[in-house]
Image (tube, rainbow, N blue to C red):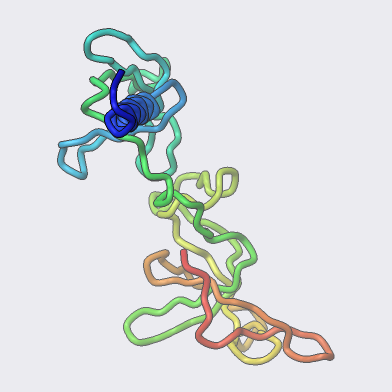
Amino acid sequence: MFPASIDFNLKKSYNSFVVKIQKKEDKKLAVGDLVVEKRIKKNKKRIGEVIFVREGRRRKLEMVELNKHDLRPLEKCSLDGPKIFSLDETACKKLNLLRFKEKRTFQLGDIIKFSKCGRSRFGILTSFIHPDGLYSDSFEKGYNGKDFLECIEILPKNGLPRRVDERNKPHIFLATPDHAKCCVIIPMDKEGGLRIKERSFFVN
């Protein structure tokens, strides 16, 4: 029989060993996990969702490749299904989802501030215009990040009146997403109406 001090140390070592094994098991990737490649140039790293795990001496993961921007499955060029790829588990790590936290995007009806070349214009977003003149998918899927923003120009004073020409027709302008921000709109006063909250914008 071992002395109490040695027996205690043995139990402590055993418990520590069990905890390490449990942590190692918990770190194993499983079906449904989102992973990203390791040891690859940043712009070439693939992101995937694990759909099958091949057990063995070296675990191999089979994954559906996902879009790097919105995590939607990527389609093959032949359009006959999603892109599939396989990697050893040691070549992957769990994806940090914090960077994919949903951001506010441009929506129809937003009040836009468009600043370029030292000049700022304000407008109500009324439409999305595809750069190549094609039909924009922003109407169904949400803003795609590349369309021009068609706006009816407004004056940034209380009440947000439309800017019109001598024929009383509203001014229309196109804004580019890189130079546009969504304004924060607040009540003008107790009587109603709207105004732009100065220096406050949504981050897009």
Can residue 16 be seen by looking at this rendering? yes
- Residue 147: percent from left, percent from top: 44, 55
In percent of width and height, residue 16 lies at 32, 32
Residue at image location 29% in from the left, 27% down from the top: 3
Q: Is residue 31 above or below residue 96?
A: above
Which residue does the image show at 45% across and 35% down from the upper left? Answer: 72
Q: Which is nearer the eye, 121 or 167? A: 121
Q: Give 147 or 170, whichever is nearer the viewer.
A: 147
Q: Which x, y percent locates residue 6?
A: 27, 30
| Foreground pick, 59 / 74 | 59
Return the residue nearer the eye: 35 or 14: 14
Vertical order, 59 against 43 (above or below): above
- Would residue 65 be seen by someone viewing this image from the given angle? no
Toward the right, the furthest residue is 191
Q: Where is residue 43, by image quadrant? A: top left
In which image quadrant can residue 37 be found? top left
Q: Residue at x 45, y 60 (%)?
A: 148
Image position of 107 with respect to 53: above or below = below
Image quarter in which the N terminus is found: top left
Which residue appears at 73% of the width and 84% of the height? 187
Instruction: Give the total number of marks visible in the rendering.
Output: 0
